[in-house]
Amino acid sequence: MELTAVIEKVDIVNQVVETGSFMDKGMGMLKSRISLLPQGQHAEYVIRVTKAGGFYNLSKRFSEFAQLHEELKARFGAALPMDLPSKTVIRHFDPNQLEDRKHALNCYLKELCRSR
């Protein structure tokens, strides 16, 4: 049975809403750009997983890919045949950068699904 997982799209969640307040704008900017903060604007990757003719969709943040990768490294060490794209401290919401990250994560998922 072949397992596939493909990121179909990237959604921007909790987009910053302009209220006009200088303080709200500043806090919104910080929350949306610094990835060490758990709140604020972020990207969610919508993944279609297919196996044995059935499929389901799920949404994951990059931090969840990073957690999975750390678990796999702990279990398989140097035998793990793929690398996760690097995490950035500053969040980027430019469509071209999101598309590049989506492509890199799809390559990661392809290798992961190919591995036994």
Image: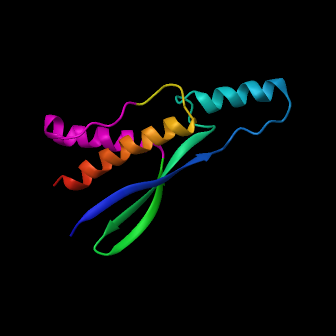
Give the residue drawn at x 13%, y 39%: 79
Residue 70: x percent and y percent?
30, 38
Position of residue 50 relative to residue 27, above or below, is below
Instruction: Return the residue found at the far bottom.
Output: 53
Name the residue furthest front: 96
Q: Quadrant of residue 102?
A: top left
Seen from the viewer's position, the closer of residues 71 and 100 is 100
In the image, residue 34 lies at what x, y percent? 57, 27
In the drawing, does residue 47 fall left or right of residue 35? left
Apparent side of residue 68 relative to residue 95 in the rendered image (left or right): left
Direction from residue 78 to residue 52 in the image, left or right: right
Point out the stretch of residues depicted in magenta: 61-86
The quarter of the rendered structure image containing the C terminus is: bottom left
Which of the 4 image quarters holds residue 65?
A: top left
Q: What's the image's color scheme? A: rainbow
Q: Which residue is drawn at the image coordinates 34% and 66% (left, top)?
A: 50
Main SS of the magenta part reads helix
What's the residue at 37%, 39% (across, down)? 66
Q: Is residue 59 above or below residue 33?
A: below
All told, the count of numbered labels is 0
Q: Residue furthest left?
A: 79
Residue 111: x %, y % from top left? 24, 48
Residue 4 falls inside the magenta stretch = no
**Between residues 54 and 73, which one lies in front from this camera angle?**
54
What residue lies at 23% left-to-right and 40% top-to-bottom? 82
Position of residue 10 relative to residue 23, above or below, is below
Quadrant of image for the N terminus: bottom left
Query: Quadrant location of residue 22?
Result: top right
Residue 82, magenta (yes or no): yes
Q: Position of residue 6 (x, y in %)?
A: 38, 56
